[in-house]
Image (cartoon, rainbow, N blue to C red):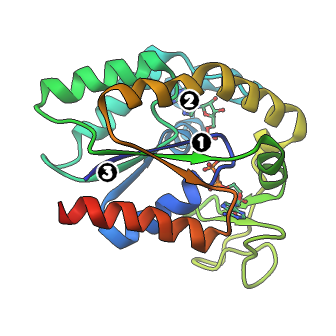
Amino acid sequence: MRIVLLGAPGAGKGTHCKRIERQYSLVHLASGDILRQERAADTELGKKAQRYMDSGALVPDELIVEMMTEVIKKIPENGSFVLDGFPRTVNQADEFDKSLASAGQKIDIVLNLKIDDRITVERLTGRRSCPECGAVYHIENLKPKVEGICDNDGTKLIQRPDDNPEVVANRLRTYHEQTEPVVDYYRKNNTVYDIDAGKDADEVIALLFEKLDALAKA
Ligand code: ADP
Ligand code: AMP
């Protein structure tokens, strides 16, 4: 299965992708996580991406498309993946479709997490992440067993520097201006399912599994 999970920052893409990855044994590819790894390793790409990420703007399309095409190439042929945070512009979606088509592939399903901006602000400012395994928690909604510590590996949780209210406001503006049109782009040629991501996390994942189970059986 080749899955694209769309949604505003804070909609729950990373949270649900981790569950999808386990349930269907596929690869979770999060462009934001890959960029943060590039930054941590102090690569040329990481250095170029830094100022965009810090301000809540998008990293230029040509850098992102190249990065994601390289990562996807490494997945064995006909391998399954779920994309999180990519594509984020119509141009990225179009370039990516062309590169899949040239390999005789296409996206099988697009899942669109719909959420109100007010909720995403609460979610992002309360988010805590594991720098080691990428697990995501929330200080109120999805707490770790021990406060401030990752359940999986005992690492101290961190707050992402771009999860502060000022940068969150920029990221939401960027989402509405540049990423929302990607949903309509996919509606033209793909099956897009809208999911109410404001519900409880277990209810959201049940809706996502329902759609993916139907696709797997088809
Ligand atoms: P995204 O990857 O879309 O930016 P995340 O998956 O990191 O979003 O989720 C953002 C924050 O919201 C995290 O702190 C996460 O624990 C919390 N969260 C995700 N989904 C839900 C939900 N359905 N209900 C409550 N909190 C949620
Ligand atoms: P995320 O982890 O998805 O919230 O992404 C964090 C930041 O990485 C974003 O605010 C952007 O600056 C950058 N980023 C991640 N994915 C993309 C993408 N597909 N296109 C451009 N910039 C991206």
Q: Residue furthest right?
A: 165
User: Where residue 2 appears, x then y in whole percent?
Assistant: 28, 47
User: Foreground: 176 or 86?
Assistant: 176
Could you tell which of marks 1 and 2 lies nearer the N-terminus?
1
Kindly identify which residue carries mark 3.
81
Q: Residues within 10 Å of mark 1 (few under 14, many from 20)?
A: few
On screen, residue 146 above or below 35: below
Q: Alpha-carbon distance for marks 1 and 3?
A: 24 Å
Dividing the picture into quadrants, the one containing residue 161 is: top right
At 63% from the left edge and 68% from the top edge, which residue is drawn? 201
Q: Secondary structure at mark 1?
A: helix
Q: In this orientation, which residue lies closer to the viewer: 51 or 196?
A: 196
Residue at x 54%, y 45% (from the top left corner): 33
Quadrant of image for the C terminus: bottom left
Q: State the separation of the CA atoms marked 3 and 2.
A: 23 Å
Name the image quarter holding residue 105.
top left
Left or right relative to 181: residue 141: right
For badge 2, the amino acid type reads Gly
Real-space Cα separation, disc 1 to disc 2, in angstroms: 8 Å
Figure quadrant, ligand 1: bottom right
In the image as oriented, which residue stretches furthest toward the bottom? 145
The earlier-in-sequence mark between 1 and 3 is: 1
Look at mark 1 in the image and give the residue it sits on.
40
Q: Is 75 situated left or right of 81 in this image? A: left
Neighbourhood count class around disc 2 (C-alpha, 10 Å): few under 14, some 14–19, many 20 upward: some
Please name the residue shown 79% across and 72% down the image.
148
